[in-house]
Amino acid sequence: MNTPSFSRRNFLKVTASAAGGLMVGFSLPTALQAAMGEAGEINAWLTIDPDNIVSIVTPQTEMGQGAWTAIPMMIAEELDVPWENVRSVRADANRHVNNADLYTTTSTGGSTTVSRRHPYMMQAGASARERLRVAASKRWDVPLEKVVAKQGYLTAEHEEHGVMQGTYGEFAADAVAVTLEAEPAIKAYGDWWLLGKDVKRLDVSSKTNGTAVYPIDVTVEGMVYAAVQACPVPEGKLVSFDFEAVKGMPGVIAAVELTQVKDVPAFTDLRSAVAIVAESWFQAKNALAVMPIVWDFGRGATISFESQTAEALSLLAAPGTVLKDEDGNVGKGLDKGVNHDAVPDLIAASAKLVTGEVYSRPFEAHATMMPPCAVADVKADRVDVWTFTQDIGRSLNEVADQLGRDTKAVFLHQTQLGGGFGGGYNMDVHRQAAAISAAVGKPVKVIRSREEDIAQDSQRPPVWGTYKAALGEDGLPVALLTHFVGEEKMPAFAQRGVANMPYLIPNRRHENSFVQNHIPIGYHRAPGANSNGFIVEQMVDELALAGGWDPLEWRLKLTEGMEPWQRVLLAMKAKSGWTTDMGDGEGMGLAVVESHGTIAGCVATVSVTRRGQVFVDRLQYFINSGYVINPLNAREQAESSAVWELGHAMFGGLQIRDGRIVNTNFDSYPLMRMPDTPPEIEVNLEMSEDQWWGGLGEPTGPPTPPAVANAIFYATGTRVRSTPLSKAEL
Amino acid sequence: MAITLNINGQDHMIDADPQMPLLWAIREKAGLSGTKFGCGIAQCGACTVIVDGNAVRSCNTPLASAVGKAIRTIEGVSVNNDHPVQLAWQELTVPQCGYCQSGQIMSAVALLEKSPNPSDNEIDKAMAGNICRCGTYPRIRAAIHRAAEMSKT
């Protein structure tokens, strides 16, 4: 016999509405809980305990972007449970890796946590909700269609007993055993009760009292500390070091040589390096600083940014190659029937030719506020690791690879990250910690000094670009030829935001060339688009002005019929107070770039002093990502990406001499500080809401530098074609 | 060498080199991990603590110079995470990755203790030593004003 059960909270309400007769089988809450046993894991994504607290698992990393809140939101939406009952808990990387990627992926990048992952995450919530309904229908012996799951309660009208109600927690154990005949469909936009509302990120308060835990905060019994140095010229190798010279220094325990696992410069391999292990990190760092080390600098030893620039300029003087994307298309913009083969002839025969000069952006580091750090505790039968990673599964596999261990014996624990921005992918700090712990037989915490961080980071690559365009009678381009030079290891970065620019120019050809480069390369918040947008969107202003068009009207004209772009551009026109004529020393500039499936427009207002100092007074953003599940978090990310990229554009730029990065701390690699930040950053969400989803962790970066540079042009008449903008002569 | 440090009103006996930066004594010896390492050269402010009422960068402050002084870290700002600065930070969802925020909060607390109702210019000046790569500056600025307002009532 199925026994109706009740929660204490709902007892009065239910008896009142059911007019008696419901006392049959009533259980006291304590007895009820005892009968139900432990918390029920409905599926790998969530657990509901007897108190109706729902714990939702996050496979993705939290680095300030809100993953540990967004994932529970998406699942709670479908489960239909009060937000205050939701707890955000960490996925077990070991379980993920050893169960055929249980959570699909643990990778956290490309602004994909919501945009790409929402279908299966919401499905996990919907599936759990349906299983709870089936469990209630069985226990109460009512048809499934009569069972309603809402806000943590299951309710049904029973023919004899009247209204039945119970919490999800009371049915969790039953639901574990339920198999669904078919998976339910996830909700469509408009049916949401939680998504689309402002929700504060769940971890904010842990970040106002110092209790949030980052890898650098993890302590293991008996732990020692290591400072590391890899070859200052990337790809170079350690020849020798003299530990005898420093072994008597206070606290020093050992020196450990770190060698590449594979003899090729792989992105995530251990690099040739040496570590000093000591009782405190300060002691390790001091000893490492004075230990004599001999390096073989390798092929990069003569390379500088200037030598790479000279190579790029010579490549730009000759035709490049037309690259194809993964599907064999010659760039997204060129699959609309436009002819890239006709471009060289059209340019050669043009009566109204516009020839662009060379633009460039330099290398930039991630310089996350937490320098890369990892703790490893390597034991005979088990390995525990806490590390700086944007992909716990991948890093677990790398540790297993480093140590030659079975992945089943490796446990990689998710912590907060002190920033990521793409820096947590091509990262070998956990390999270093694992190798050192294995060598000294103790748990080890590796902390990179800031200098070592910037010297060894997987940098955002530089780009150099130029263009030629043939204009027609109406002043609009008939043919466009671009040539972008990237670096050889990640050629795709030289295309993003270029080949897929939206503008309806009947003949387009996008060529590429590549410079030799030994500096490690990585993803860097809106990779490719972040640098290329600076070039493309200034080119657009040059073309518009050459053809006698207003830059905003030009963009509107050449995206006609493209609703997501028109929505953004029309909002800019309606709300920004757009003008190219603000008067002497002041200027307004705009740019619009798509990245991660999101179109982001920026209108920048600047003032330039008589001495040529640039102040960014105001930044306005107009963003279309299709949908937004948490407008508050969307605004936070829009502000964040904007300040991030403005910092590189105004002040950044890595200098390379003799193959090594020479500005490796914040004194020589200046970034955005509060006094430099515009007093006003306005974010307008202009959503299409028509079945496509873009990401929001990165897209306001790319349009920011070109909007500012365009504004500088309207303020001064000078076009700035490289960054940092603060060094431009105005 | 045994050194006594007064951190958040409590004496800690610390066995360390007097030249060791205060940061590492706080983190590794006193076990208070809220204060962060960012650059080691007093350029980023992640390590900011308050010593005798002044915001200082603990990463290049020798241990010896803090003896006999009142050292305050993020753990000493309040017991229940409810100092006006903390409340304002929560209300305006200031922290993103959060790593720099202990230092930001300590700089803000020191500022407000000296200037309870700071102007934007004063805020910019007092906070210029604290880098935030997540770019939370506009929210920090607003939250300092909010904390000033909350402190009045």
Image (tube, coloured by chain):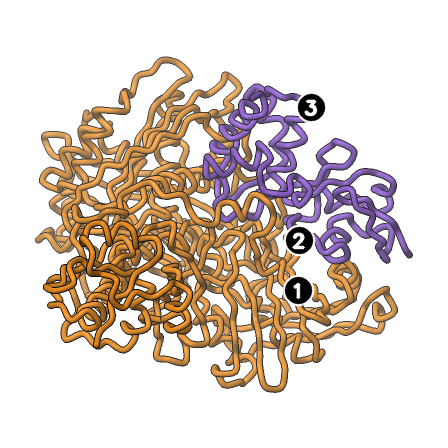
Chain colours: A orange, B purple
Query: Disc 2, disc 1: CB below 8 Å?
Result: yes
Which residue is denoted by mark 3 in the rendering?
B114
**Residue B138 location (% of width, % of height):** 47, 31
Hey, which residue is sitting farthest right in the picture? B1
**Left or right: residue A557 compared with residue B34:** left
Which residue is denoted by mark 1 in the rendering?
A219
Q: Chain of mark 3?
A: B
Q: What's the residue type where badge 1 is placed? A: Thr
Q: What's the residue type where badge 3 is placed? A: Lys
Identified at 32% across, 71% down, the residue is A43
Q: Chain of mark 1?
A: A
Q: Which of these two is toward me, A642 or A9?
A: A9
**Left or right: residue A30 compared with residue B2:** left
Which residue is denoted by mark 2 in the rendering?
B33
Compared to residue A126, the image places residue A511 above or below, namely above
**Residue A47 location (% of width, % of height):** 37, 66
Residue A441 occupies quadrant: bottom right
Identified at 12% across, 34% down, the residue is A472
Residue A237 occupies quadrant: bottom right
**Residue A187 location (% of width, % of height):** 17, 55
The earlier-in-sequence mark between 2 and 3 is 2
The answer to whether any part of residue A107 appears in the image is no
Determine the CA span between mark 2 and mark 1.
10 Å
Q: Chain of mark 2?
A: B
**Residue A647 location (% of width, % of height):** 49, 38
